């Protein structure tokens, strides 16, 4: 691996969407990297689509369109991307993209800037999208780019980084070669859908006979109250309308009462509207729904990146809680997703393995991780990551103690 960074720095002002670029030489590995602002990302749509065909691991939360929307909804957010380029047959080819924002780390009391990945609060996978044949050299050059930059923090905070695939394996190799190692915080295994079976066969294996019987009863009793329909919104205007229904339904429930619904925050609502609209225009967003007499009962937003799908957001009408509307809809979209042979797998985007989506049998490992972009690591990283780990451990222990106490009180 070459020690000379290849960096094209597009500037790092938080205001504005464009900046002048300065070229930097390609490294011996044949990879060059630029720090790109939101305006620059509008130019690489075709390159992104091409990269997805070669990607080691697709990730919709690295989609350039989402960074542009995040910037529009939060102009001061410092949203940027590392773009890696190679030469393929005399033309420039995108070899990797790692989007980020600069700010204080999430779930931390440390008052310092880091490179936060994903770049927006509602992103649930930090894995960069990189050409499967250029993983090591691309990651190495990206880290050199960060280390050489005069404006970027040197610590990357990777929230829900995929740890079970080739990209993470490559990252560990690269960090080891650079004399560094990651600091790993919480690790979980979340549900994933990846099967050759059809929906009926899959659910018969995934759910017990008594569970399937109960769901049939719920569906029948719900249908007795009116016209029960299941639908998939795929056309851009239909998706837009469905998203508005989704936002209203989510806000009417417990998230709305707690102020955590998307519609409770103008920035979050604007981002979600813009993000889903942008993806829908490219055929990469659908909304699965169950309606009763035209009223939404349960809804699931699904987004795509290449051969991967992601069940991004879900909501249901609490008035129908006794009918298990989330599980009824899960039956429907599980069958629909398995029937779509262009989908290799579906990431649940769940926080852990305890929700209703645990009915899916496959699992994906993710972890919150900090890494140091500098070769040889640094005393600063070791000290700060140690403090962060201590804080997270204490926080998790306090949460576990509280949940145990609350369970005892209920008993």
Image (cartoon, helix red, strand yellow):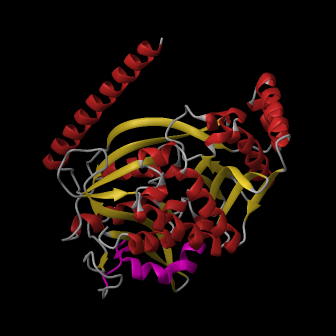
Name which residue lies at 64% across and 57% down: 302
Query: Where residue 73 sits: x, y (%)?
Result: 41, 71
User: Quick one: 403 or 306, which is closer to the camera?
Assistant: 403
Q: Is residue 137 left or right of residue 316?
A: left
Query: Where residue 359 sits: x, y (%)?
Result: 67, 34
Query: Can you see residue 31?
Result: no
Query: Where residue 410 sits: x, y (%)?
Result: 46, 15
Name which residue lies at 46% across and 54% down: 127
Q: Is residue 288 above or below residue 74?
A: above
Q: Is residue 197 left or right of residue 124?
A: right
User: Quick one: 87 or 56, which is closer to the camera?
Assistant: 56
In magenta segment, residue 34: yes
Name which residue lies at 59% across and 73% down: 49
Residue 46 occupies which quadrant of the picture?
bottom right
Q: Which residues are magenta?
A: 23-50
User: Quick one: 83 or 235, which is closer to the camera?
Assistant: 235
Q: Is residue 212 above or below residue 198?
A: above
Q: Is residue 145 left or right of residue 122?
A: left
Q: Is residue 329 above or below residue 211?
A: below
Residue 156 occupies which quadrant of the picture?
bottom left
Q: Is residue 289 left or right of residue 271?
A: right
Q: Is residue 283 above or below residue 341?
A: below
Query: Where residue 365 sits: x, y (%)?
Result: 51, 40
Number of numbered callouts drawn: 0
Name which residue lies at 75% across and 52% down: 291
In magenta segment, residue 378: no
Residue 286 occupies which quadrant of the picture?
bottom right
Query: Can you see residue 317?
Result: yes
- Viewport quadrant of the N terminus: bottom left
């Amino acid at each position: 691996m070459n020690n000379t960074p290849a960096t094209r720095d597009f500037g790092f002002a938080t205001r504005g969407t464009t900046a002048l670029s300065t070229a930097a030489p390609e490294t011996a590995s044949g990879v060059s990297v630029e720090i790109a602002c939101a305006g620059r990302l509008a130019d690489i749509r075709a390159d992104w689509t091409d990269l997805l065909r070669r990607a080691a691991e697709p990730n919709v939360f690295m989609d350039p369109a989402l960074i542009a929307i995040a910037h529009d909804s939060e102009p001061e957010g410092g949203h940027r991307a590392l773009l890696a380029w190679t030469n393929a047959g005399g033309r420039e080819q995108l070899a990797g993209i790692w989007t980020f924002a600069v700010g204080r780390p999430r779930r931390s009391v440390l008052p310092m800037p880091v490179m936060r990945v994903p770049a927006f609060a509602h992103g649930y996978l930090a894995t960069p999208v990189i050409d499967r044949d250029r993983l090591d050299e691309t990651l190495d050059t990206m880290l050199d780019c960060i280390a050489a930059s005069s404006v970027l923090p040197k610590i990357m905070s990777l929230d829900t980084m995929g740890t079970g695939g080739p990209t993470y394996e490559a990252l560990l190799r690269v960090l080891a070669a650079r004399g560094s190692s990651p600091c790993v915080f919480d690790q979980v295994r979340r549900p994933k859908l990846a099967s050759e079976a059809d929906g009926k066969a899959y659910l018969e294996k995934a759910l017990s006979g008594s569970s399937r019987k109960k769901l049939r009863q719920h569906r029948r009793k719900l249908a007795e109250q009116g016209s029960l329909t299941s639908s998939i919104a795929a056309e851009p205007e239909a998706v837009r309308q469905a998203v508005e229904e989704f936002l209203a339904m989510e806000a009417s429930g417990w998230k709305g009462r707690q102020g955590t619904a998307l519609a409770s925050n103008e920035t979050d609502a604007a981002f979600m509207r813009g993000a889903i609209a942008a993806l829908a225009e490219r055929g990469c967003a659908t909304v699965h729904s169950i309606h009763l007499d035209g009223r939404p009962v349960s809804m699931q937003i699904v987004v795509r990146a290449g051969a991967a799908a992601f069940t991004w957001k879900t909501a249901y009408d609490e008035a129908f809680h006794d009918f298990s509307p989330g599980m009824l809809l899960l039956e429907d979209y599980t069958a629909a997703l398995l029937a779509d042979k262009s989908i290799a797998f579906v990431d649940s985007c769940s926080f852990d393995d305890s929700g209703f989506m645990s009915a899916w049998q496959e699992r994906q490992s993710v972890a919150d991780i900090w890494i140091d972009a500098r070769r040889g690591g640094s005393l600063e990283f070791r000290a700060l990551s140690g403090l962060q780990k201590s804080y997270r451990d204490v926080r998790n222990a306090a949460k576990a103690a509280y949940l145990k106490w609350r369970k005892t009180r209920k008993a």
